[in-house]
Image: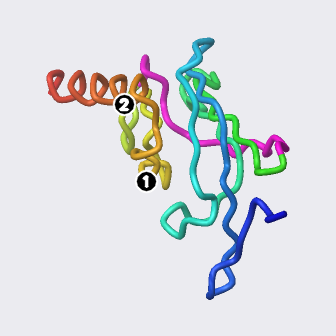
Amino acid sequence: MSTPWWTDPDGTLHEIYTGQIYIGNKHFGPISYDSGRRDLLWHRCSYAFFCRVCGEVWARIVMFNSRGEQQAFEPVCVSCKEHSDLWNVPGSLLANHLDRLLDSLPPEVLRRELELLLEKELAV
């Protein structure tokens, strides 16, 4: 029987993480990726998107390792869609290293991200 994780020649542990994306109370679909990807900076956690303006956790990406264990949450400070943000697109999940997950996002999230970018561009 093979293990659900592996180590590459440089010693990096790889493991497929699976999870679910929630924005507000709405489920936006599944996500899956190799947690050992160098471009993800080896973060092995769930994510809680926190708006510094209103204090709301407006989105969550709940991740599980290959053994089905839920991973602890790491806060990601990005304003919700209702508030301005100097460094990020308000309401976007593509902040910090998470922009590298673009290829792993479900279609409904991609559509939402595109709409947020278009709204931002049209507002300028």
The residue lying toward the viewer, choosing from 10 and 23, is 10
- From the viewer's perspective, is 96 left or right of 17? left
Q: Residues under labels 1 and 2: Cα distance?
A: 13 Å
Return the x and y of residue 28 as percentages of the image width and height: 53, 21
Magenta segment's dominant SS is: loop
Q: Which quadrant of the rendered structure holds the C terminus? A: top left
The residue lying toward the viewer, choosing from 37 and 119, is 37
Look at mark 1 in the image and give the residue it sits on.
100
Asked whether 82 falls inside the magenta stretch, the response is yes
Q: Which residues are magenta?
A: 68-83
Residue under the image location 66 percent in, 42 percent down: 18
Residues packed near mark 2 inside 10 Å, few (<14), some (14 to 19) or many (20 plus): some
Return the x and y of residue 29 as percentages of the image width and height: 55, 25
Q: Amino acid at mark 2?
A: Leu
Asked whether 103 falls inside the magenta stretch, the response is no
Residues packed near mark 1 inside 10 Å, few (<14), some (14 to 19) or many (20 plus): some
Label 2: which secondary element: helix
Residue under the image location 45 percent in, 31 percent down: 106
Q: Is residue 7 above or below residue 39?
A: below
Return the x and y of residue 36 as percentages of the image width and height: 62, 66
Q: Amino acid at mark 1?
A: Arg
Of all residues, the one furthest to the top in this rendering is: 25
The residue lying toward the viewer, choosing from 44 and 6, is 6
